[in-house]
Amino acid sequence: MAALQSSSHMVHKTTLIHHTQVLSQRTCSSFRTAASVRIFYYKGSSSVRLFSFLNTMRHYSVSSGDDIYPSSKRRSRGPVMAAKKASQGGKQEEGKYKHTVDLPKTTFGMRANALVREPELQKLWEDNQASFVIHDGPPYANGDLHMGHALNKILKDIINRYKSLSKDARKDLTPTKLRAKAANFATETVEKQMASFKRYGVWADWDNPYLTLDPKYEASQVEVFGQMALQGYIYRGLKPVHWSPSSRTALAEAELEYPEGHISRSIYAIFRIVSAPSTSVAFLEEFFPDLCLAIWTTTPWTVPANAAVAVNAKLQYAIVEVHSSSGDASSSSGNKKQRLGNVMQEQKKLFLVVAADLVPTLEAKWGVKLVVKKTLSGSDLENCRYLHPIDNRECPVVFGGDYITTESGTGLVHTAPSHGPEDYATGLKYGLPMLSLVGDDGKFTEEAVHFSGLDVLGDGNISVVKFLDEKKSIIMEEPYEHKYPYDWRTKKPTIFRATEQWFASVEGFRQAAMDAIGLVKWIPPQAVNRISAMTSSRSDWCISRQRAWGVPIPAFFHKNTKVPLMNEETIDHIKSIIGQKGSDAWWDMTVESLLPEKYRDKASDYEKGTDTMDVWFDSGSSWAAVLGKRDGVSFPADLCLEGTDQHRGWFQSSLLTGVATKGKAPYSSVITHGFVLDEKGSKMSKSLGNVVDPRTIIEGGKNSKEEPAYGADVLRLWVSSVDYTSDVMIGPQVLRQISDIYRKLRGTLRYLLGNLHDWKADYAVSYHDLPMIDKHALFQLENVVKNIGESYENHQFFKIFQIIQRFVVVDLSNFYFDVAKDRLYVGVIAPILPHLAEDVWQNLPFQYVLEDGSPANFVFESKWPSLNDKWLAFPTEEIDFWGKILELRTEVNKVLEAARMGKLIGSSLEAKVYLQTSDPNLAARLNELCAASNDADALHRIFITSQVEILHHLDNKTENIQYKGECQIQGSDPVWVGVSRAEGSKCERCWNYAPEVGSFVEHQTLCGRCYKVVATQPEPVVAAVGSA
């Protein structure tokens, strides 16, 4: 079961809680008509595990299976090719013994037909129940889904499904109208995204979602806020915050983007020193009145609010005299966009204070000679005073923090407490004035006098630069390209601006949060470093927003004193109202109605606050709305999985609210994944034309050749193939490769289903009676199941992809299927490829029955296979021996191919193989296989030839063998390999060559093996056909 959360906000969140689901046990008569067969307990000691990659049942057909799965090179194709022609309606060669050959039969198609079949299968997964909780993060409902959504949700769904198997025009709108439009937008987008997630094959309780606009959710959020407020973690204060003039609201760090290519107007400016403390005046006064502090800023518009210049007490500073250079700065530095200020054109003496280490850099930058007159420490500069260049206020030199370095600038920092966190902290330390000269719209207020009404990011910035230059206060102006914060919604620049906001005091529970981080399992492990660093250094969290949509901060303000009224009684009352009527009530109801009974006689003295809660507080409270409040959904969540950017977003906001109110993180484990890039490793963008749309992958594009419809399972298989802990790549070539692997896997499963068409429980063979090749295959199988299970548990899905690919293509298809086309496997692939697994399940020719006797009508009603210790106990010496057989078979195939190219043979069944080795132990084992009583272990069956002979030594006979080779087996002497034409005649039934063909009176064209089969079978009834 999963639950979907979306916000009541204009740009909202959708969050899921995933649970594993156990599908209802209803009959599927439309999908399966064969009789029930109990699978797990049969005669003998061996159990047969149908969906554990291998079935030990025996169909003694000798077909190659090439119609269903291609074998390596040319192999025997007789009866199978005839059957294929017949199935295609072609002319079939009449075969006397065709009725005696048990060929694969299945209704399971080679083509996936994903556009039709996948939606059909998804309808079978609607009923479910909860057992494992993945608390899903907040993707914002701001448009169609992209590849990042696909990677994220499919990763969650793979985990979810495995756990199922392993566990049983804003200004003209009133707030009410705007909120209604926001709710409609959110609901429509939730439904649209929900449909896309369903098409990915994602399991969720889609009929019972939780939404942030749901009154119960909003009430839970108010409850979290209230608990934090009552513990003293919430306060209101005047502090600089990220402010979006385009949205007219404060923003959290997680609501910012930092696009490349932003260019700021930077300036090197000077502030003239007018006095120095008694401890420093003696060695500074000789430079008065021409001594200035040199600063550098990329935000000239903040200079009107300047209250101090900060220095680093640990740095060395120099007093330098400026000597004009013969060239200009732009030619010296090679930057034609630099411009020297008016003060540099004068012939007056000019002394500047700069960091000593930066003197050479500044000389080159400004194109002047800086002559060092004296050096001093930063501590010598404290309490010097300078004239503000705009309004002539006297301002102090103060000590800043470690943020003052010599990496850039001048080593002195212009400080405006209203416009930066470090500036604010320094201002608190020294009691500096907070000059708020910028309004909500990002324009200078009247208090800015010269710049009133000008946009600080536009004309206002230009005007400040011009004014300072006219005052002879600018050394140089130049463009500066850097990363700058933008509003993620409007895509426009933001500013730091001091406003009264509500804050969560992280300092009050920071250590508890750090302790909680240590109790969470982080995947990959290095993720703990990132969340720890961000939490340990995080400043107080601004949780208020100036928006009409969202959950209100339940505070009333006294009309005269502006003191907020917010206590346990008022918060509980508001929570109760919102729980019944929703957060719209805050805007629709009067203050008197919203206040508790004891305060209503004073209602006329108060007004409602207009701030709403930060969207990250919304999503960060999602655990409170769901975990522990729904049946089967406990606190904390088992797992959260999101992109690595959520360390500063949802992971952190959930952590902080959980620790502040519950004393622990609301999740036990956290997985982070990287971003999706194109197949060249570039970021996807519409302008580059490299965007890969998940819908196009599934349903195809306009050009079906260039953009074929792969279906959801190919997309899911790609997700399983990548190491999601770092950035991953996708594109047309990648998808073609994944599609090829999917087709091979589907073809293999089709072959296996074909072999099951007439399977019965009586066919089960005990492990003791199995051929050694089957025991070796079962040993491989158990290791595969074991390794895949461990990889699922460790969430290393790319390892599962690699294991399955090797097992299907190499171990099974290139060896086991080629050799033993009458034995079977199916894959534990359902969590990754649920549509393919379910399609196979629905095409089983019998009903699968669990150990308790109940039918498993769907693949996810079956259990994850428990390991078979007997199969894993395959002797070490046998493992080594079969490894040598595989090595030897590879060399035999090479010699067979040379003989085929030389026209000595056609198919490999026309050949006889000779082997010779001086290793007595290996020779003895090879002779055992040649004389094996069980036909499946016979060496000529393993090589797919008609005969094999083991030679004691090389003699004149071997010199006449034209095609030969040598296999160097590790740990053994080399094995000589030779190939000649097979002896005897061709058997009409199996196409093997044998000397005894022609010796059976009733069946002259059969070999001894086929004669034994045919002699016990009745002749088919054939209608007589007269000649014309």
Image: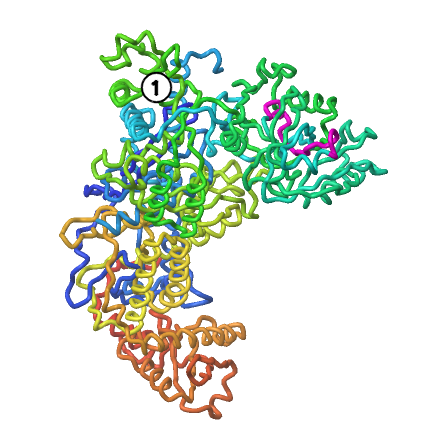
Residue 364 in view of the camera: no
- Residue 505 lies, in percent from the top left, at 39, 32
The residue under the point 36% across, 69% down is 819
The image quarter containing residue 500 is top left
Residue labelled with disc 1: 555
Question: Is 391 or 630 nearer to us in this picture?
Answer: 391
- Left/right placement of residue 448 relative to residue 514 reads right
Q: How many marks?
A: 1
Whether residue 294 is in magenta: the answer is yes
- Highlighted range, magenta: 286-306
Q: What element carries label 1?
A: loop
- Left/right placement of residue 193 relative to residue 484 reads left
**Compared with residue 666, is residue 824 higher up or lower down, i.e. above or below?**
below
Question: Is 123 or 1 nearer to us in this picture?
Answer: 1
Disc 1 crowd, CA 10 A, few/some/many (<14, 14-19, 20+): some
Q: Which amino acid is tagged 1?
A: Ala
The image quarter containing residue 115 is top left
- Residue 732 lies, in percent from the top left, at 53, 46
